Amino acid sequence: MAASEPALPAPPVLANDWALFLDVDGCLLEHAPTPQQVCVPERLGQRLCGIAAELNGALALVSGRSIAALDGLFPECAQLCVVGLHGLERRGAQTDRCAPEPPPALAAVLRESDRLLQTYPGACVEMSGPCLNLHWRAAPQAATAMTAFAEAALPRLSGYGLHRGAHGIEVRPGGSDKGSAIAELLQRPPFRGRRPVFVGDDPADECGFAVVNAHDGISVLVGRRANSAAHHGLPGPEQVRRWLGAQAQAA
């Protein structure tokens, strides 16, 4: 979105009839050069637990990270509903879901990516369950080569697709995304019958915005990006945390 364009209006204050779905990276937490380098502000996990209690449990983290990685970031939040790997795995909302096992070919692709990391210092390739994530936030010059690498690997991975982000590309199994995960949770207690609210920042969050908009919900884009379906906006994670009533002091 061009700087001259008006910002989206801020979302309304939190209400106790919401079903609140929150992305993590770029939404609750500032992006870092690599996913392992993010900083979690003090008391953020405690505040998320507090909001969940206020909503009678109708709060879920909806992330591209694995549930194990999210537990490492928010150890206080073991009782929250968590959707990991863009909906491939879930904990809570009555039934858990485990991600499928990665095909052997994925490990081979990961090994072959070493040459990219040698050529582009700062780039990052990681395997999360059955997903392969290629990040170039710290090495933007790697974008073209890493995208070409992912495209070349795709034919070897049956049932997989490419999902392009602002600073990376993900190779992951098809059949699930954040939108379908949110839609499923909205059919289950404690989310059922509530007004859905989804906060995200990445192109991968657009499917979630579409679902909550279709349910007369509140879609919140963090940052600025052209052609988003979101109806509301916040400038960055610090403003998201303030909106949630969380402390912003870094740990």
Image (cartoon, rainbow, N blue to C red):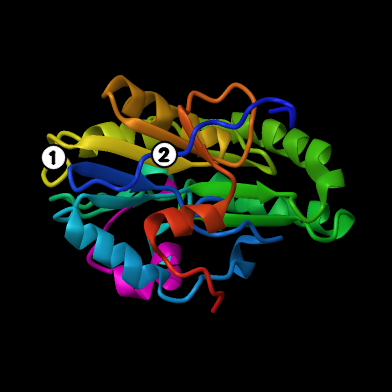
Give the quadrant of the N terminus: top right
Closer to us: 47 or 179: 47
User: Mark 1 or 2 closer to N-term?
Assistant: 2
Residue drawn 43% across the image and 42% down it: 199
Which image quarter: residue 186? top left
Give the quadrant of the C terminus: bottom right
Residue drawn 13% across the image and 50% down it: 94
Is the residue 138 above or below the residue 185 in the image?
Answer: below
Residue on which the image places disc 1:
188
Indicate whether residue 11 is drawn in magenta.
no
Q: Amino acid at mark 2?
A: Pro
Indicate whether residue 73 is drawn in magenta.
yes
Q: The residue tagged with tag 1: helix, strand or loop?
A: loop
Q: Amino acid at mark 1?
A: Arg
Q: Position of residue 87 (x, y in %)?
A: 36, 42
Asked if residue 98 shows in the view, the reply is no
Q: Is residue 116 left or right of residue 30?
A: right
Q: Position of residue 62 (x, y in %)?
A: 38, 48
Residue drawn 34% across the image and 46% down it: 13
Residue on which the image places disc 2:
11
Label 1 and label 2: CA atoms lie apart by 25 Å
Q: Position of residue 53 (x, y in %)?
A: 18, 62
Q: Is residue 172 left or right of residue 16?
A: right
Instruction: Please provide the residue range marked out in magenta.
Output: 69-85
